[in-house]
Amino acid sequence: MPRLPESFLQELRYRCDIESIVSSYVQLKRRGRTLLGLCPFHSEKTPSFNVYPETQSYYCFGCGAGGDVITFVRQMENLGYVDAVKFLAQRVGMQMPEEGLEDPAGQLRQVILEINRASARYFHHLLVSPQGRPGLEYLTGRGLTVKTIKHFGLGYAGGEWDGLARHLKSLGYTESQMLAASVVAPRKNGGVYDLFRERAMFPIIDLRGNVIGFGGRTMGERGPKYLNSPDTAVFKKSRNLFALNFAKAAKEDKLILAEGYMDVIALHQAGFENAVATLGTSLTSEQSRLISQYASQVILSYDSDEAGQKATRRAIGLFDQVGLKVRVLQMTGAKDPDEYIKKFGAGRFKLLLDGADNAVEFELEKLRRKYDLETADGKVSFLKEAASLLAGIQSPVEREVYLGRVAQEMEIDKQALALQAEAVLKRKGAAQRKKEQSDLKNFMQLRPGEPQGMPRRGEQLTAAIAEERLIGLIYKNPDYAAGVQQRISPEDFTDEGCRRLYELLCQRLQAGDSLEVTALGQQLEEQDFSRLAGIIAASSGVHYTKQEAEDYIAVILRASKIKTKEQLAGLPQEELRQYIQSLADRKK
């Protein structure tokens, strides 16, 4: 079967949200960051079927069925791979690519990444040269150290119209390739000019260490204050975050979400290495899902102006949808984290973080300011909106606590407020059921597929577990892969399934390809894909470190030296004696 272009599969994945598709077949209930329901592939009374919106995958801990949205439709509708893709493409109005064609998008993507890396090096070299003095003075004037500047790979775009373009031409890149990378723009009379000029440059790096785009802060009066790379074949502003490549390695199970590049860099320099920022746009649902892969809690650290507060309220709603706990930083005496740390120091900012309000407290405080609580009308309006807010709290215990607190504050009967919240819940439930019925009409009659058997591990259970965890670690931290590959090869794996998965992940990373489940599913047999889905499910919410990678490698390498019964039977007498002696020495 010819492979479908990955650019097509990626777009299909984003249009076919797995929660929406699976909900048309299975009744799902949210449980924290995941969705839970009765498995459609085997008979069960206790739900064990999990959907993971952040990775767009599913896995059943009862029967081992797992995969992505394409696999799910294949199993439910008893379709082949291409037919399942056609089924989903038709649902969202996408045109299927012509069969038998090569994927030029993948080749162009690799060239764009090379151009971006070369551009980042050019900008950084310029920054530390005499020509880059304006940029260096700006960055150091904002309190950044040379170490921080190097750590983030910051640079400077000079005032020349085509300085970068000429440099890239000298490396062999064409104008059309530069235009595809969006580091230049076309002139009206032919030729190109540099997109970024007279700006301090902030390279945007993905989780694999690739430079995928840039942000530039003007040093002059021309153009917008901040200019960001437009979307390209390797960069989508709505699907990436600044500094996540560093923040994901932080020990804390929470991320700080700030508004801009300088806020994030200042936070990292002050020791808060779990800070990230959006890329010149409001927070998107894709970004909230991405954050949920690396944290169970997010602290919103937006500017204190009206625009920042509006962005805060929007972000709270998006994070609630993916089951993340939200706290909101309230800063007084400074408009943003960068200014606050400069004025009051990192110690005071740490206290501010520790005392941040949760999302409910933040919203209630906004309502208190909105109404005059000294009047009857103001109090009634506040209580109606508060009841609607509290009805949205997922945890019954947390909802009960806040109902009591608000009722006591407003000096009314708690039962009356609870009844108001219950009425809101009923209205929301009716609207949801109506939506589900409408979605069901868009799908054909259900035809459950055959149950998928649980994958069998090799005889060496400890090694198999270490192998699975190493695969999960690479999937979540692709930038660790290069170091892992230097220590261990596919031949060292004792479990054949894990060996195949490890080999595929390494091959794709070396080729600069993504590890999104939809792309992987095209290259994996159904059993291996289910195995991978289980590994991804087990790694949900887990934060791996490089030391853990070393520990898994050590276990795998030890196990690789242990011979199987078949291998022992085929050893010559002298080699068998030496092997037995080595085991005895190891026990000593």
Image (cartoon, grey):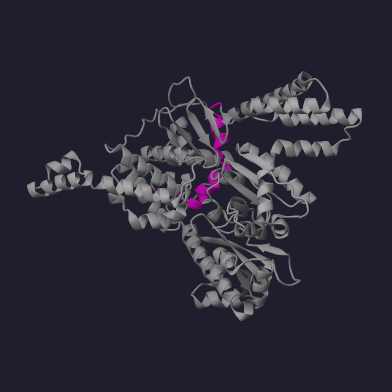
Coordinates of residue 473 in the picture (x, y in percent):
43, 47
Quarter holding residue 137: bottom right
User: Relative to residue 103, is residue 443 depicted above or below?
Assistant: above
Residue 135 to residue 472: above or below: below
Tell me if I can see residue 522 in this picture.
no
Residue 448 left/right relative to 558: right
Q: Is residue 165 above or below residue 347?
A: below
Query: Which residue does the image show at 81% across and 28% down from the upper left?
Result: 409
Residue 242 picture quarter:
bottom right
- Left or right of residue 41, residue 583 in this image: left
* Pick the front one: 489 or 228: 489
Where are the magenta residues, as a range? 2-27
> Horizontal and vertical percent for residue 12?
54, 45
**Identity of the residue furthest to the left in this view:** 573
- Tell me, yes or no, whether the highlighted magenta stretch contains residue 195: no
Residue 111 lies, in percent from the top left, at: 49, 65
Task: Examine the residues drawn in magenta and state their main secondary structure.
Answer: helix
Outermost residue on the bottom side: it is: 130
Whether residue 253 sits left or right of residue 222 in the image: it is left
Is residue 23 highlighted in magenta?
Answer: yes
All told, the count of numbered labels is 0
The single residue placed furthest to the right in the displayed view is 375
Q: Residue at x 41, y 58 (%)?
A: 510
Residue ID at (50%, 50%): 97
Q: Is residue 553 visible?
A: yes
Quarter of the image with the C terminus is: top left
Q: Nearer the viewer, residue 509 or 87?
A: 509
Depth check, front residue: 497 or 89: 497
Residue 429 rendering spot, x and y as whole percentages: 67, 25
